[in-house]
Image: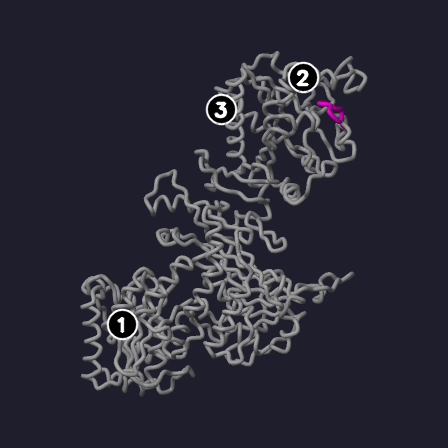
Amino acid sequence: MLVCVVLLLVTLCSQGGNGEETQGQGHVSVVIVGGTGDLAKKYLWQGFFQLYAHHVSSGNSFSFYGGGLSPAEKATPVLFEILKAVTCPKDVSQERCAILREQFLRLTEYKQLKTVEEYQDLSKQIEQQLQQEGLTEAGRLFYLSVPAFAYADIAEKINSTCRPKGGTWLRVVLEKPFGHDFRSAQVLASQLGSALKDEEMYRIDHYLGKQVVAKILPFREENKKFLDPIWNKHHIERVEIVLKETLDVKGRIPFYDQYGVIRDVLQNHLTEVMTLMTMRLPVNLSSSEEVLQNKLRIFSSLLPVGKNQAVIGQYQAYKAQVQQELNMTKDHISITPTFAAVLAHMDEAQYEGVPILLISGKMLDERVGYARVLFKNDIFCLQNQNSVHCKPKQIVFHFGHGSLQYPAILVSKNLFKPVFKDSQWKEVMEHKDLSVLGLPVSDYYVHTPTELKEAYSELISHIFAGRKDSFISTENLLASWGMWTPLLSSIASSFPRIYPGGADNGGLLDVNLKGKEISYNSEVVIINNNPLGGTSANGFQVMQGKFRSCEMVSAWAEELVEKLATDLQEAAEEAVREGGVFHLALSGGSSPLALFHRLALHHFSFPWRDTHVWMVDERCVPLTDPESNFHNLHDHLLQHVKIPYYNIHPMPVQLNQRLCVEEDGGTLQYEEEIKKLVNGSSFHFVLLGVGYDAHTASLFPGPKIDQHGESLVALTESPAKPHQRMSLTFSAINRARRVSLLVMGKSKHEMITQLSRVKDNPQKWPVTGVKPSDGRLVWYLDYDTLLG
């Protein structure tokens, strides 16, 4: 019957043919172990149907088996529902397509593959079919779409029961992950090596089947005369290899939580792209051995990648997903990263000093993958800044998705017009009104495949043809793990930065490259192990971390104020327990008003009777004036709590019916009051804000800021009305046991971003002069301020 099917299809499909290399005529048995799983459903059966459609007319015959642990009566209906969904290549007519699909279903069956005996039965069935139908066997292809822990056992069963006889080939395809680190990969390679020869193993990385990735080496070869002079450290500014995803890992947590983004994406997909971008061009591009040796040279030249060469993150909802899918308690915290940015460098003359940035993550703002080579541009356009000469010079290998939506290779027009000798690529002449990595598409030469092909289908055709250049050898695998294992060990106990996901990430995951090290552009944030119960509408909880090397707390505004109020009450209760009194200095401005409301309306157990309230600064206006800091403090807080009036200490800005006249001695009077009542003139808690010009208290930029010496209180001058102010000095502020800086609102984002980068310079950035000598400094930044 099978022979008749082949003859019929030879007749029907004789006009077909796709120009692929064939493996020789004969019968091929294809076994997908895990044949009803997600990968098989989405990609593998479609890929093998494409293979069947292309090669059945070339004298090959096929039989297909979906294997698995489930009994045949249960799994067979599932398998055939999957098979009904396969589609034909575009160049196949509807009539031929219907026949091909019908015969593909008739040639496929499900086999339970659990025991050695069941693998023996499969082999006997293959041999009986060959004998009964008089077929010559070409080979057997096993695709293991199963967890990696099952590889060694299945490989042994294949070796002992299903190995074909004579010169017939055996090919076993393995899906990642190939180990967890160097040691586990080495053990797995050894186990597989005891059952299979290296040439029989096809470790698949589907990224190598993507058309743009597969074109990297040919593109470099075809454009060698343009690229050779500039493909080096003298001209390349940096290399970026990026894979951004918008989806989370819900439903994959049991796997993902063991691996994380570095093992799942960077160690394989992005590393393979990196080697193709940087390796020396082989003389023979189709020589898998030469390609491998050139890849290995790249790994040997890479400088060690450690903790200072990586930043990691985790999307906010991941914690709850782990707790739910792994049945963990609410206090369980996973530190598995879902985002990573890694900086690599090479100790190799051609690329010495060139930063290579590898980035991937879940729940990011867009789905896109690309590799970009950004070249240096020394041209300065004095008059026409939009001149093509002044725009970025770059080559982008765009894998797909993003704003462009299709795979393409883009070369900026201020570089060169690329050559594509392959007829399977075409130039895109009409451009949509969109940009790719900072340039309008019209500023690029854009080439895309003439026919879009699915990566798995491409790689399956390579497996059938016996091509090894698109697969991961044992040496390649271990070299890659040798690069990544030290990094994974160094960050094993590091807390990832928490990010909300999607567009809400803002600049939270932006990175800064400094020499051979990488860091977040704003300092590291880690999740608080004891977050407050309340969450924002976005579900983003209070977080803790570092800013300007000091403690930082961050959240949406409401949660941030709640956290600050709680911290303030805890500090008050501790001070009262220790010494019977709590000295609190409060700043003016608009930022503290929400805190005042929170304290007045929700913190009824606050020890107000034992609290003394002092002013950090005051405008030189009557205390009854609406612009008075004390007036606002009184209206929004003091009149609503039970605090003794003699515990309230407004600044004496009005003496002798005059405002802030130095001869009246208001500053000395307030200083003496502090020295008399506050032990060591050391406030327990000082709350400060930060202005747009980075002033704090009423200490403004300028040379006079350092003239107060050891004085605790001083008269100062503001650039804004009312100009005259009275303020605590750095000397008073820095004696405090705890200083908190509260900054909220998007309007403060630019200022906070600048502060994250500058050194201490109180004359220019007054808040950098706040450095408690024996106390704690804590920044309270809301997400609008932090993210913009």
Q: Quadrant of residue 237?
A: bottom right
SS of the residue under disc 2: helix
The image position of residue 67, as x and y in percent, is 25, 67
Say which quarter of the image contains residue 729. Answer: top right
Magenta span contains residue 711: yes
Quick one: SS at disc 1?
helix
Instruction: Name the quadrant containing residue 596.
Output: top right
Query: Would you call the spot at circle 2 few (<14 residues within 10 Å), some (14-19), or many (20 or more)?
Result: few
Q: Position of residue 3 (x, y in %)?
A: 24, 85
Percent x, y for residue 436?
58, 62
Residue in the image at 73% along x and 15% along y: 669
Query: From the viewer's perspective, is residue 745 above or below residue 665?
Result: below
Disc number lying in front (3 or 2): 2
Image quarter hosting the C terminus: top right
Report the Cα–Cα distance between label 1 and label 2: 87 Å
Q: CA distance from mark 3 to mark 2?
A: 32 Å
Which region is colored magenta? Answer: 709-716
Is 8 displayed left or right of 676 in the figure? left
> Is residue 210 placed above or below 129 in the rendered structure?
above
* Mark linked to residue 675: 2
Q: Earlier in the sequence, mark 1 or mark 2?
A: 1
